[in-house]
């Protein structure tokens, strides 16, 4: 059962019946959430501080209780806020898709329920539209750790703190096909570093998401909607702009994926962890246990398959995936070893060649991990040039601290006028040609 509380939607639908796209917001900020009102309430309050009438806020809730709805009702006087409750069972991929379905903006930004945004996001999207940019992908410049955050190595050292690394305010235009191939060579691990367009903690034109749905039947797939979305979007985004600017503020709460990973709890039995996906197809070659590494790989491979990019499957770096799984999840080593033969069949690579690549990646990865752990234990909490703000109680206070920091250093994005760089042009792959 769906329950929608959205005054703006009613008014917009009445207007559209007479005027086509009249009243369409420029930007929809979507928050899919489930059973985490302690974060979502703060995120909504922070978003409502954005003064622009050109933005709508869509909260897609699939929680076991109606606690969040009770708090949301107090804000329904703001016509920009749309709350939709869908009774469980609803998995994370379905929740993301429902959030996009309820959005109506020309551009869409999906946030975690513990994230925040710089209010300058609306000006940035106006700049993107004026420059015919399909996607804005802000780099991870600012990160806020909620007061309940804990980690295995540092305990509560980061709790209640905001970290802002130095940034240039500049931008660049990555080549989508090159970024996609780089992601495949890295087995879909950590897509945010591979210059892909992102709708999760990024901004994308809604029509690009609509093309994914037309092609695959849904906005998202796999078990990691952020990874699936980034890989799929690379086939449909023509012009992506990567920003070195704190436009989106990543939040890390104890109950978030990042929080669970920090405590070594983001892993487990595949069937138990993915009960919400009863018809899930697990790709051959991906170890059959639940971890960040395996779900990222599953989502990336699913995106390649469903968008018709099977030409890239042979280049998928299974040896690197297996090495990362072995290093991060040694207790599941037997699951990783069992996946070797299946991976060889998918890529057409000989077992010997795959084994050599695996051993090389394992040695490099183990050395890098040891170096990272040692340096994180010995070095100060923040690196050179990183600004740290302590004692912040929620994401709203963290957003205001980011605003003050940006104002103090005199930085602003976007700059006036047209973008100075032109996006490289490329011929779309044959598998998606004709879908534009």
Image (tube, grey):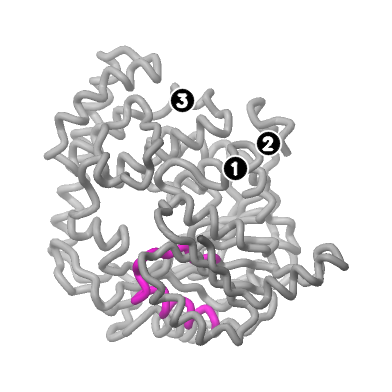
SS assignment at label 2: loop
Judge whether residue 45 is colored magenta. Answer: yes
SS assignment at label 1: loop
How much space separates mark 1 and mark 3, taking CA atoms? 20 Å
Q: Which residue is mark 2?
A: 426
- x, y percent for residue 212: 61, 42
How much space separates mark 2 and mark 1, taking CA atoms? 8 Å
Question: Is 157 on the left-hand or right-hand side of 175?
Answer: left
Q: Which residue is mark 1?
A: 175
- x, y percent for residue 198: 53, 53
Nearest the viewer among 90 and 136 is 90
Magenta segment boundaries in residue numbering: 30-48
Nearest the viewer among 220 and 406 is 220
Label 1 near label 2: C-beta < 8 Å?
yes
Judge whether residue 169 is colored magenta. Answer: no
On residue 313, the disc is: 3
Image point 64% across, 73% down: which residue?
55
């Amino acid at each position: 059962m769906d329950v929608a509380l959205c005054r703006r939607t009613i008014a917009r639908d009445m207007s559209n019946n007479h005027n086509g796209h009249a009243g369409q917001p420029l930007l929809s900020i979507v928050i899919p959430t489930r059973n985490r009102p302690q974060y979502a309430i703060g995120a909504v309050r922070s978003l409502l501080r954005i003064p622009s009438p050109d933005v709508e806020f869509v909260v897609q809730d699939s929680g076991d209780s109606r606690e969040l709805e009770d708090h949301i009702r107090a804000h329904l006087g703001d016509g920009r806020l749309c709350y939709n409750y869908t009774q469980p069972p609803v998995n994370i991929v379905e929740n993301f898709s429902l959030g996009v379905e309820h959005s109506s903006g020309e551009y869409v930004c999906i946030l975690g329920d513990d994230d925040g945004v710089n209010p300058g996001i609306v000006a940035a999207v106006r700049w993107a539209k004026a420059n015919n940019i399909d996607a804005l992908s802000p780099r991870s410049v600012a990160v806020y750790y909620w007061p309940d955050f804990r980690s295995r190595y540092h305990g509560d050292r980061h709790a209640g703190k905001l970290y802002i690394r130095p940034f240039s305010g500049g931008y660049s235009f990555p080549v989508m096909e090159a970024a996609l191939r780089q992601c495949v060579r890295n087995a879909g691990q950590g897509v945010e570093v591979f210059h892909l367009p992102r709708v999760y903690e990024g901004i994308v034109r809604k029509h690009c998401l609509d093309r994914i749905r037309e092609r695959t039947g849904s906005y998202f797939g796999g078990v990691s909607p952020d990874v699936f979305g980034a890989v799929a979007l690379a086939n449909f985004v023509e012009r992506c702009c990567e920003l070195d600017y704190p436009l989106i503020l990543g939040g890390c709460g104890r109950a978030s994926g990042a929080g669970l990973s920090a405590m070594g709890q983001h892993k487990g039995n595949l069937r138990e962890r993915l009960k919400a996906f009863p018809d899930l197809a697990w790709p051959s070659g991906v170890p059959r246990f639940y971890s960040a590494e395996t779900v990222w790989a599953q989502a990336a491979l699913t995106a390649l398959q469903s968008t018709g990019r099977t030409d890239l499957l042979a280049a998928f770096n299974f040896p690197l995936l297996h090495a990362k799984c072995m290093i991060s999840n040694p207790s599941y080593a037997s699951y990783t070893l069992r996946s070797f033969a299946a991976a060889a069949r998918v890529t057409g690579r000989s077992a010997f060649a795959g084994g050599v690549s695996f051993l090389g990646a394992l040695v490099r990865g183990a050395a890098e991990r040891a170096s990272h752990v040692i340096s994180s234990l010995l070095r100060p909490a923040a690196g050179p040039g990183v600004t740290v703000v302590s004692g912040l109680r929620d994401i709203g206070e963290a957003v205001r601290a980011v605003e003050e920091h940006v104002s103090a250093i005199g930085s602003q994005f976007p700059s006036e006028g047209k973008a100075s760089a032109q996006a490289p042009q490329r011929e779309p792959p044959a598998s998606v040609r004709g879908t534009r």
